[in-house]
Amino acid sequence: MKNYTFLLLTMCFLSLSSFKPDMPAYKLFDSQGKEIKYKKMIKELGNAEIVLFGEYHNNPIAHWLELEVTKSLYDSMNGKLIMGAEMFEADNQLIIDEYMNDFISRDKFEAECRLWSNYDTDYEPLIRFAKDSAVHFVATNIPRRYASIVHKKGIDTLDKLSDEAKRFIAPLPIEFDPDSVLIAKMGGMMGKSPLPIAKAQAIKDATMGFFITKNFTAGHLFIHYNGSFHSDDDGGIRKYLQIYQPGMKVKTITTVSQEDIDKLSDEYLGKADYIICVPTDMTKTYVGMRR
């Protein structure tokens, strides 16, 4: 009987060992490319005042981790958390507040808030968490109609807007460096004159940075969700945060994709303080335009 049991256990071991090891959906690295544990990242993020979470808009791992990181920080900060997002425009803050305080229904909120097309799968869980936890949620982005004006007619056109309209934009004029890395990036992406697009991008970054600092409360941690392009490489929103409130302690997270996630590619080193690396064949939450 003992020999039979030993043989059975041996066969089970050999059978299990023939399977491939677990296939992780992501790996987490620090800025230098060293793998880091989730709990250690959360502990370090707790020392910041602002956390910029850079996502791929259609990546389910990034969206899942946004919610998990938010829950972890809420616990570690004893509820002293503020949430905000690129996906909500500043002129919709009243609608968000009314929904959070149960003055309007979920249907009214969703009908009037100009939500992105992937809201239900990717951002509704964050809104629900904020509502259930009584966490202030800030709409930080410039209304898209004004960003479109910058792209089509130039950034100086914003000066002609009414004072009421300017309430939803960063104070004008914004600082803009025509020789910035952003310009080079936009040129490479678009294959044409990048300046108008880069200025539209800059007014978004400035506005998000402005509303983050405007709604920040000392002793709290503000976590902000945005496309990784808005906070990578120590630029974008992060640059404007230091303009509006110098010395603010900011940490960044970004999302990258590569075939083999065991080792972070050199091209992603230094892109953010923490780097979520996901396989390139990860499923997408949508295909095509984000809205």
Image (cartoon, rainbow, N blue to C red):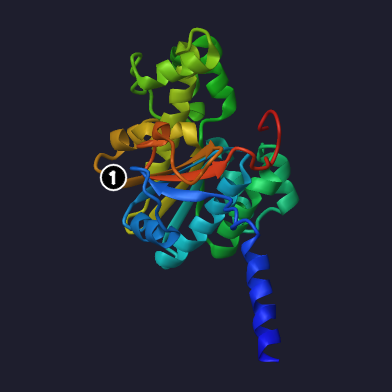
Kindly identify the residue that appears in the image at 71 percent across and 92 percent down: 1
Label tally: 1
Could you say whether the residue bearing mark 1 is in a helix, strand or loop?
loop
Kindly identify the residue that appears in the image at 71 percent across and 85 percent down: 4
Q: Quadrant of the C terminus?
A: top right
Q: Which of 125 and 144 is in front in this view?
A: 125
Horizontal side, residue 66 vs residue 43: left or right: right
Q: Nearer the viewer, residue 131 or 72?
A: 72
In this rendering, is residue 270 above or below 50?
above
Kindly identify the residue that appears in the image at 59 percent across and 57 percent down: 21
Residue 22 picture location, percent across and down: 59, 57
Residue 145 seen in the figure: yes
Residue 174 picture location, percent across and down: 36, 23
Q: Nearer the viewer, residue 151 or 168?
A: 151
Horizontal side, residue 49 vs residue 14: left or right: left
Q: Which of 278 and 260 is in front in this view?
A: 260
The amino acid sitting under disc 1 is Met
Quadrant of res 175 = top left
Q: Mark 1 points at which residue?
A: 248
Kindly identify the residue that appears in the image at 33 percent across and 18 percent down: 177
